[in-house]
Image: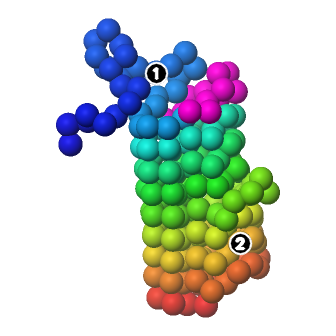
Amino acid sequence: GDGQYLTNVGGASTDAWAQDTWGNLVAGTGAGQSLNGANSECNILIGPDAGKSLSSGGSNIIMGRDAGCASTGGDFNVFLNWEAGLNQQGDENIFIGKYAGKGTGGSSWNGAYNIAMGSKAGCSLDGGDYNIFLGKYAGRSVDSGNTNIALGCAAGKDLTSGVSNVLIGHGAG
């Protein structure tokens, strides 16, 4: 596209994309609308409502429609694609794919160091740390639990909690 629908772009004298005073780069209607000065620094928020509620936390990369939209805090996260990390509040998570790491909402979501890659991978995750879900629907129903690994399309899709589960292959678990 020609970028005609991007907002917050072109404010610099060279018509370049310019960061704000706190080092945030924002583009998209509603994106980063709750950024709170020094409490939310060095974020990159791109897409309609990307990081919309982010009022604290820094060094996040949030791109895609509604990605991280309900997240109010968290540091060093990467959320890419539609509603990736939508409700997350934790730190150092990587969610890539439509609804990856979306969570069900609420302030209790505070998981950290999780990786979910693939459409709906880890999409019910509301807590837990050090989980890895790779593949479409991998770990789809996990809402809590730590150190779980699900690799492959639909691997661990019916697992809801647990610790140290390893599921490898299409539909494993």
Q: In the picture, residue 46 is in which quadrant? A: top left
Residue 120 part of the magenta-drawn span:
no
Q: Residue at x 74, y 78 (%)?
A: 161
Gap in angstroms between the C-alphas marked 1 and 2:
36 Å
Measured from the top left, where is residue 105 in percent x and y? 69, 59
- Kind of residue sitting beneath label 1: Gln
Furthest-top residue in view? 13
The residue carrying mark 1 is 19
Furthest-right residue in view? 108
**92, above or below 22, in the image:** below
The residue carrying mark 2 is 143
Q: Can see residue 113?
A: no
Q: Which residues are magenta?
A: 33-44
Residue 36 part of the magenta-drawn span:
yes
Q: Can see residue 89?
A: yes
Measured from the top left, where is residue 57 in percent x and y? 67, 36
Q: In the picture, residue 127 is in which quadrant? A: bottom right
